[in-house]
Amino acid sequence: MPLNVNAARAKVRAAKRVAVLTGAGVSAESGIPTFRGSGGFWSHQRFEDLATPEGFAKDPKFVWEWYEAHRRNIAKAKPNAGHLALAELEGRVRWFTLITQNVDGLHDLAGSRNVVKLHGDIWVVRCTVCGRERTERAELTELPPRCACGGMLRPGVVWFGEMLPEGAMEAAAEAVRAADVLIVAGTSAQVYPAAGLIPLAVSAGAVVIEINPEETDFSSEVTLALRGTSAVVLPELV
């Protein structure tokens, strides 16, 4: 479909309840590669080695070296115009929920407050023994790092084969069911259960606005498809 920001803007302006689902494409313009695209994180590495409990158990030092390098790269990134537009939108709408598949924390840095993190947070570390979590942005010099209890720490992200954070999907589904408008930005909608939020919104009667440079599996089901990157389209929408 051709770019139709005016129609989408009218839908958002009329909405009392807005939910947003974001994926890796939103952060790509901040210099953070996507996981599946050309040049993405998994293009040169086996996710089985780096993003599964089995891979971590086999070689925690190797996994942590990769994640710490990734954390340092993310630390250099700044929120882009798409992140900032969503934070601004939150301040304009009476009821707003941002649901993200990203773990980089850029939505937080942009000023978004009501954020549901489906896949965890790379700045959180969790003890594999006592389960205690803490936010840790400082560079980790000892790898793998250790908890005060002596247990090994792991990245606070969701690996393949793991459950989502407790309550996250329930909160996301509740937000989508209640929304007048769902904005889907920068996601290929291939990863479940997050991708299931789009048909959930459709079935609940919400206006669904897709923002993506390319068509996705759900493009034919949405109300409006805006072809462009989130850093360009979201500021125009807001």
Image: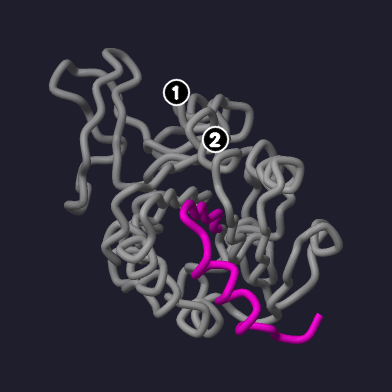
Instruction: Specify the amino acid type for callout 2.
Output: Trp
Residue 53 relative to residue 195: left or right: left
| Residue drawn at x 58%, y 57% as measured from the top left | 181
Which span of residues is magenta-colored?
1-22
Secondary structure beneath label 2:
loop
The residue located at (80%, 64%) in the rendering is 219
Please report the residue visible at 81 percent of the width from the left and 80 percent of the height from the top: 1
In this picture the colour scheme is one colour
Residue 31 at x, y percent in the picture = 45, 75
Residue 159 numbered tag: 2
Relative vertical location of residue 213 with respect to residue 111 in this rendering, above or below: below
Q: Is residue 183 above or below residue 126?
A: below
For disc 1, the marked residue is 166
Q: Indicate left or right for 236 with 124 as reference.
A: right
Q: Quadrant of the C terminus?
A: bottom left
Secondary structure under badge 1? Answer: loop
